[in-house]
């Protein structure tokens, strides 16, 4: 029987590549993408790779999308969808803070609740959370994002203990600073803020992602290993901190 893996946030980044590689390995992959335009882009990428994907519009913050996903028979869920809102704790607007938590915490948890029901009935399943090293530590100007990943760490830990009796496995993946564009977008999110720039404490034109970024290949390999069961660790940290630069801020 072919294993079905649902990957959220498969329109870009880690989720995009992992979905394609798992499909190439023969898994039945449901690739959830946030917006409809990503369906076509991912389908074209699948054609180029010669693989089959079930691509679905799945915005984890949308109740209708979550209820649709609840009808699928999913064996393994990768909660990969996420956004990164950069900015000082003193400056980040309320709307951006709420969006950060809705996408990274509330949506994934509500989706997990729905899919868990069928897993419990089958007495088997795996829930994997794409966390971050930011869930274990934090940098200036990434408090909102880091706090969302700290929350995911707590949720995953509690869930792991709660569903063990039902035969459900839970794991986390904690990527470090890898080059996918995700980290850079974090430090450009201020450009869409609806606020009074004159009241900001910091000049965001002069703030950038503080760390050297690396080839994401190790994250792809680790993620696939965790999803397929080849890696059985609960927490899986992919990070290279040997060349971290000091954070430079110009006020």
Image (tube, grey):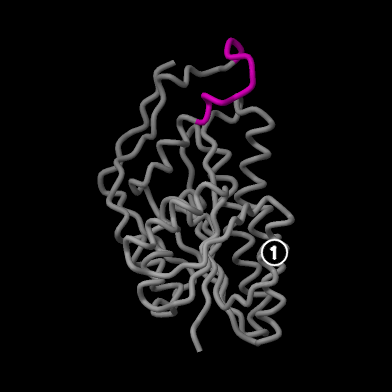
Residue at 37 percent across and 31 percent down: it is 247
User: Main SS type for the magenta part?
Assistant: helix
Q: Any magenta on residue 28?
A: no
Q: Splitting the image into 4 quarters, where does residue 156 fall?
A: bottom right
Q: Is residue 80 above or below residue 183?
A: below
Q: Residues within 10 Å of mark 1 (few under 14, many from 20)?
A: few
Viewer-side residue, 241 vs 17 = 17
- Residue 71 point in image, percent of width and height: 69, 72
Per the rendered image, the range of residues in magenta is 189-199
Mark 1 — residue?
68
Q: Is residue 129 above or below residue 247?
A: below
Q: Tell me if residue 31 comes above or below residue 1 in the rendering.
A: above
For this orientation, the residue located farthest to the bottom is 1
Q: On the rendered structure, is 2 left or right of 250?
A: right
For the point 39% across and 56% down, which residue is it? Answer: 44
Which residue is more in the foreground, 164 or 32? Answer: 32
Towards the viewer: 82 or 150: 82
- Numbered label tally: 1
Please state the horizontal and vertical placement of residue 223, each as a whole percent of the image: 41, 66
């Amino acid at each position: 029987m072919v294993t079905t893996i649902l990957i959220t946030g498969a329109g870009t980044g880690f989720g995009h590549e992992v979905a394609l590689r798992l499909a190439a390995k023969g898994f039945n992959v449901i690739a959830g993408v946030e917006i409809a335009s990503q369906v076509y882009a991912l389908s074209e990428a699948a054609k180029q790779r010669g693989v089959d994907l079930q691509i679905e519009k799945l915005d984890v913050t949308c109740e209708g999308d979550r209820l649709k996903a609840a009808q699928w028979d999913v064996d393994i869920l990768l909660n990969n969808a996420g956004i990164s809102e950069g900015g000082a704790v003193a400056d980040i607007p309320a709307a951006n803070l709420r969006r950060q938590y809705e996408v990274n915490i509330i949506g994934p948890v509500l989706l997990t609740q729905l899919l868990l029901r069928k897993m419990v009935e089958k007495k088997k399943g795996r829930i994997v959370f794409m966390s971050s090293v930011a869930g274990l530590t934090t940098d200036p100007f990434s408090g909102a994002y880091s706090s969302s990943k700290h929350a995911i760490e707590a949720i995953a830990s509690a869930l792991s203990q709660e569903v063990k009796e039902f035969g459900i496995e839970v794991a986390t993946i904690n990527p470090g600073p890898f080059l996918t564009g995700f980290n850079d977008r974090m430090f450009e999110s201020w450009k869409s803020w609806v606020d009074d720039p004159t009241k900001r404490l910091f000049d965001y034109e002069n703030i950038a992602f503080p760390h050297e970024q690396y080839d994401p290949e190790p994250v792809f390999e680790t993620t696939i290993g965790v999803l397929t069961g080849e890696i059985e660790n609960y927490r899986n940290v992919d990070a290279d901190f040997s060349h971290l630069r000091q954070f430079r801020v110009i006020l």
